[in-house]
């Protein structure tokens, strides 16, 4: 059996004073005649549109078009579009070469269930709830776009319920561990001159993202390294002007010394002489954790610890969110600040209110109460100091 061929339009040809175009489909040929070549070409263009094969309805082609459209429209960065497309190719793999309509709501629910049980390529363990729930959200966004384009009539993922619970943030160092981490990072920089040892401290003491550390150039340091400018970042709220902790200012000035304004503050990769990859900061965090003999955490955990300590210290929630480059405190609370920090900050505020005004409120310890809590040796030393101070006062009189 002869395979059917796609219809095509050929011509125009000048025959006996008229212009002829021919529509060829399988073994049939149909001719059309016109008085002018211009008229023939115009009609040919219209017929070509009519007989053109329909656009591909394969899910893989739709996915590629979606990724390209997002970049052209500026709704997301090229890297983000690529990452999301890769995730969807893995998630929707069984349906990529099939017609879009094949992915029914029932098939989407079964596919998501299968995805939750799929082992991670990195760990070999089942995907975390945050990972497969995020993939489900991306799939919903993909099909919302497909509905707007008229490719599908309904979103097969809209009724798919998320499975599992996401973890609230990543594990964080304890305060004493963070102090040991900080001391070790300073030691690594002073003894081995590794610039990223100071970079990880920016993440810890200022709550910066990995990209916000690695993308800094010399001109981002302002007013003698008192301030750090972040002109752009992951979100529209990433642009901000932050004060640098005083202990880090001399180290940052050392890193900037002798460099041009647009040179990377933390230098280029020693191996490739190109901008440092994101993983380089993660490796430095791991190295310092190992040297400091504290639990291994990631760069995101340092940013989370900053949020937890800031909230626990009573910093206003909107100020914490702004410092992290978040649109709202809800994002900070969900992914960074530990819940106990928010509770503790609330307790501190309530105690402050009850203790205010001087009249009544929470009881405060008197000097006599405080002295009663001291051991005999400390009391004896305190008595000697008071006696010595009294003797100096009498002598001066």
Image (cartoon, helix red, strand yellow):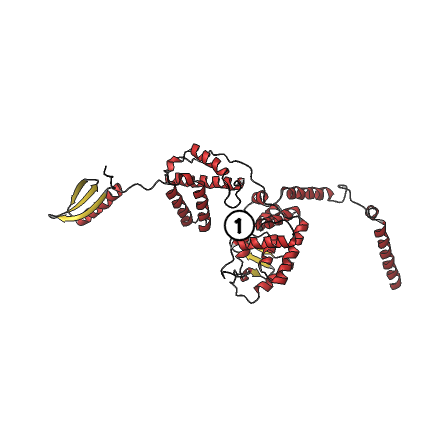
Q: Quadrant of the N terminus?
A: top left
**In the rendered view, would you say 103 is above or below 192?**
above
Residue 341 vs residue 165, the one in the foreground: 165
Q: Outermost residue toward the top?
A: 106
Residue 132 placement (x, y as % from top left):
50, 40
**In the rendered view, would you say 295 is above or below 30?**
below
Residue at x 17%, y 42% (from the top left corner): 31
Residue wearing tag 1: 237
Horizontal relation, residue 293 to residue 50: left or right: right
Residue 279 placement (x, y as % from top left):
53, 53
Residue 249 placement (x, y as % from top left):
62, 60
Does residue 116 appear in the picture of this structure?
Answer: yes
Horizontal relation, residue 345 to residue 365: left or right: left
Q: Mark 1: few, some, or many residues within 10 Å (few <14, many ≥20)? A: some
Residue 234 placement (x, y as % from top left):
51, 50
Q: Outermost residue toward the left?
A: 16
Residue at x 83%, y 52% (from the top left corner): 378
Residue 91 vs residue 222, the one in the foreground: 91
Dividing the picture into quadrants, the one containing residue 387 is bottom right
């Amino acid at each position: 059996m002869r395979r059917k061929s796609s219809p095509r339009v050929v011509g125009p040809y000048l025959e006996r004073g008229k212009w002829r175009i021919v529509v060829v489909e399988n073994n049939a040929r149909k001719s059309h005649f016109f008085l002018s070549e211009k008229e023939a070409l115009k009609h040919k263009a219209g017929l070509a549109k009519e007989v053109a094969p329909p656009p591909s309805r394969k899910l893989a082609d739709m996915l590629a078009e979606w990724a390209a459209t997002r970049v052209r429209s500026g709704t997301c960065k090229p890297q983000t579009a690529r990452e999301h497309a890769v995730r969807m190719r893995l998630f929707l793999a069984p349906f990529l070469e099939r017609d879009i309509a094949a992915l029914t709501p029932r098939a989407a629910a079964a596919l998501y269930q299968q995805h939750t049980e799929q082992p991670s390529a990195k760990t070999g363990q089942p995907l975390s709830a945050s990972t497969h729930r995020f993939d489900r959200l991306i799939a919903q966004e993909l099909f919302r776009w497909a509905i707007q384009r008229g490719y599908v009539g309904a979103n097969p993922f809209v009724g798919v319920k998320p499975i599992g619970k996401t973890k609230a943030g990543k594990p964080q160092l304890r305060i004493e561990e963070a102090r040991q981490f900080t001391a070790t990072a300073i030691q690594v920089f002073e003894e081995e001159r590794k610039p990223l040892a100071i970079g990880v401290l920016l993440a810890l003491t200022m709550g910066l993202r990995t990209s916000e550390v690695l993308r800094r150039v010399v001109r981002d340091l302002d007013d003698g390294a008192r301030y750090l400018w972040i002109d752009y970042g992951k979100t529209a709220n990433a642009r901000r002007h932050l004060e640098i902790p005083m202990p880090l200012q001399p180290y940052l000035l050392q890193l900037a010394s002798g460099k041009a304004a647009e040179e990377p503050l933390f230098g280029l990769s020693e191996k490739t002489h190109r901008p440092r990859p994101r993983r380089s900061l993660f490796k430095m965090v791991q190295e310092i954790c190992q040297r400091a003999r504290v639990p291994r955490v990631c760069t995101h955990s340092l940013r989370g610890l900053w949020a937890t300590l800031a909230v626990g210290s009573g910093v206003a929630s909107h100020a914490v969110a702004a410092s992290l480059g978040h649109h709202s405190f809800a994002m900070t609370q969900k992914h960074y600040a530990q819940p106990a920090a928010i509770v503790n900050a609330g307790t501190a505020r309530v105690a402050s209110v009850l203790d205010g005004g001087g009249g009544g409120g929470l009881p405060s310890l008197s000097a006599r109460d405080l002295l009663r809590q001291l051991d005999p040796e400390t009391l004896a030393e305190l008595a000697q100091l008071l006696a010595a101070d009294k003797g100096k006062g009498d002598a001066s009189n």
